[in-house]
Amino acid sequence: MQRLRRFAIDQGGALALAVAVFYVLGACPYIVENDNAEFATLGAAGGIAHPSGYPAYVLWLRAWSWLPVSSPAHAAAIATAILGVLQVLVLHAACRAWGARPLAATLAVGVYAVAPLVARYNTSAEAFAMNGLVVALVLWLAAANGPARGMLRAGLLGLVAGLGLANHLTCAVVAPVGLLGVVRAVREAGPLRSLPIAIGGLVLGLGAYLYLLIAPDHLASWRHPENLSDIVAIVLREDYGGMFGFSGSEAARPWAENLAELARTLGRSWLWILPVGGLAALGVAIARPRREPRAGWIALAATIVLAGPLLVTRFDIPLDVVGLWTVRRFHLLPILLFVIPIALALELAAARYEARLAGRLPAVLVVLVVLAATIASMPYLRRFRSPAMDYEVRNTLASLPQHAVLIGGVDELDVGIRYLQLACGERTDVTVIRWQTINWDWYAAKLAPFHYDKAKPFPRRQLIEQAFARGLPVFVKVGIDKSDLDGLGRYPYGIVDRVLPPGAPMPTLDEVVTQNRDLFAKFRLDYAFPGRDDEWATWMHFNYEAVWRRLAGSLARAGNAAGAAAARDLAAQLAPR
């Protein structure tokens, strides 16, 4: 009984159990974002994720793909939730190793675990949950009072670092703390014994990248490497313009906006006042170290700066609806790193009361903190747990005729249809071609029998012509270059465009409107519509709205004022709220 109480209270077991219930019950059963759809697909079908490949996380998802749940996305979400629960246990242990007592550790980790952004990415398929677990392990293993010493400390730190780099490269920002842990291991066991063990552990962890050589190769998988050079190119994200690029171009970096957004995320996650207390406590710990030596607190401060301000100012995309989704995920590491100094702040504030009420107060606070913070997080989670993307992809795929060819971009239709086809076995007759990557040799090799001459300026046109030659219906994503479609008929068909062969008769405008009304009448839209800043869900409804805005413009130019008004009304009904 004493051992159980110690695990539940002193080691965070009760908190982990409460969080496990929250995470598993909240695990998302459908795809909600681009990367989420990709990982759900690879969890079910295997393959290589976009650079840097994320082999450790893909292998973890593959190990849990057998779960008898409602969908492959749900299985991947529960597998990710398990990582989130492990993260809670390790973070609690890390707080204790850095000097916090059970009450302070429980409060800090409890608030962290159910913070809106953290709960969101710990309950749907995304590599950030494993990244958080890796960073938490480094914080725990490197602490002066960590669980291992000497060669064991060195080997475990090396192994965790290797596995972390085989998952998400941003774990490298915890290097100041990790290297401090290795230095401590060297002092404890000597360099000749510790360093080879640390290097061996690192190499063993990085061995997860060997999965890329044997991963299944299909249209949802990134390029299949043939040698070490190809693996390095994937790891270094060369196709995206480097380690911290997303646009693949020399785009301006909105550093001021990124810093402001980071500050807002930290404030929302930590109830606004706690980050101030954590920074103050970190300053006190550096000036007057207790339990953890000064070097540890300095390394932690350097890590927070690297993971926060320095990292986010490297991003090169505008902070629009989808751009915010891209960068907010990288705020998870700064949120996590604040757990240690906030636990210290709570320790200083609550020390005088814990000894007096040690028997019951921690357990009561676990329940109160998790319940209160969970309730506070629910509105946020509902916004980003919208089935809008899942339904939009299903609506579009179901509307396409047999053996259709869809040429589009790297968007929800691309990754979403791959998910439905490869993970769910739906509508495998439809061919989806990603037009941004067709000039890449490895992607072109996947497009048989759609071969084309790269010397010609518009390879997309060649793909369309070859589809016509085979008698296949062709659709393109709205926004594709008009130069690819010169001389071809084109009209709205749901959120995509139907393209007609040369000489084929175009339907009348009234026929196009009627056809789209029939399509939308079959679309599943039975959920709470998103707001105008709900990231991917908002984008889905921008797509729906744009169809009817476009048709309204065509009707107005044709002199059909009543039809134009009706189309504008439907656009308003479909728009984000």
Image: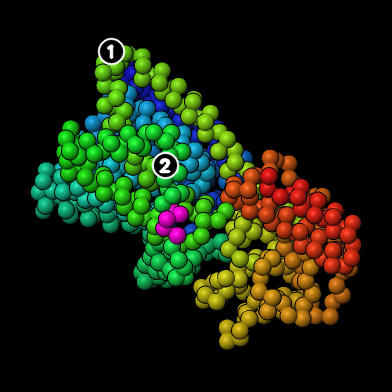
Residue displayed at 73% across by 45% down: 525
What amino acid is at disc 1? Arg
Residue 262, image x and y in percent?
42, 48
Determine which of the numbered discs, if any, sits on residue 356 in the image: 1
Nearest to the observer: residue 454 or residue 366: 366
Residue drawn at x 23%, y 31% is 99
By secondary structure, the bulk of the magenta-drawn segment is best described as helix
Taking depth in this image into account, of 381 and 26 the one nearest to the observer is 381
431 lies left or right of 18:
right
Tell me the element at label 2.
Answer: helix
Q: Is residue 480 left or right of residue 217?
A: right
Highlighted magenta segment, given as a residue range:
254-258
The kind of residue on which mark 2 rests is Leu
- Residue beneath label 2, please? 266
Query: What SS does tag 1 mark?
Result: loop
Q: Is residue 62 left or right of residue 537?
A: left
Q: Quadrant of the N terminus?
A: top left
Q: Answer yes or no: is residue 244 visible.
A: yes
Closer to the chain start, of discs 2 and 1, is: 2
The picture quadrant where one finds residue 184 is: top left
Q: CA distance from mark 2 to mark 1?
A: 32 Å
In this picture, residue 84 sits left or right of residue 24:
left
